Amino acid sequence: MRELYKRKHASYRITNHKKIFFNATKDIVCFNCKRDLLEEYVLSAPNGKYRCLDCAIKTSLIDKIPDKITKAMN
Ligand SMILES: [Zn+2]
């Protein structure tokens, strides 16, 4: 299972300060829903807050999950 995750790594820069990346190692929880984001895609924002992609969309930080990330998930 772990090997599978490793192959899914992709990152996507939205602006200089906003970036979606695959969190393989860091102990991060979503700023909004407090979900554990280990081994999940995470949006990092300039204020140092991390969000799951669902919350990133709900809070309008991103419009949708970029195609590059969607492809990497599947
Ligand atoms: Zn969340």
Image: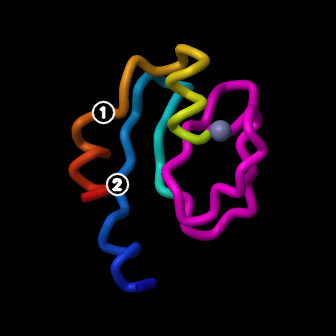
Residue 44 located within the stretch drawn in magenta: yes
Left or right, 46 with reference to 18: right
Distance from Cα at disc 2 to Cα at disc 1 = 11 Å
Q: How crowded is mark 1: few (under 14 residues within 10 Å), some or many (20 or more)?
A: some
Q: SS for tag 2?
A: loop
> Compared to 63, does 14 lie above or below?
below
Magenta: predominant secondary structure element?
A: loop
Q: How far across and down, in percent of the image, does residue 25 sit?
A: 62, 69
In the foreground, 47 or 7: 7
Name the residue at 76% across, 36% down. 31
Q: Which amino acid does label 1 sit on?
A: Pro
- The one of 26 and 51 positioned closer to us in this rendering: 51
Q: Along the horizontal axis of the image, is 16 left or right of 70?
A: right
Badge nearest the viewer, 2 or 1: 1
13 on left or right of 23:
left
For mark 1, give the secondary structure: loop
Name above or below for residue 67 compared with residue 70.
above
Residue stretch rendered in magenta on the structure: 23-51
Which amino acid, by three-letter code, is at mark 2? Ala
> Looking at the image, is mark 2 or mark 1 earlier in the sequence?
2
Q: Quadrant of residue 55?
A: top right
Quarter where residue 33 is shown: top right
* 11 left or right, relative to 70: right
The residue pinned by badge 2 equals 10
Location of ligand 1 given as a quarter of the image: top right
Can you give x and y, in whole percent of width and height, for residue 44 in the image? 60, 36
Q: Which residue is drawn at 75% across and 50% down?
A: 29
x, y (%) of residue 1?
41, 85
Which quarter of the figure is the C terminus placed in? bottom left
Residue under pointer 1? 66
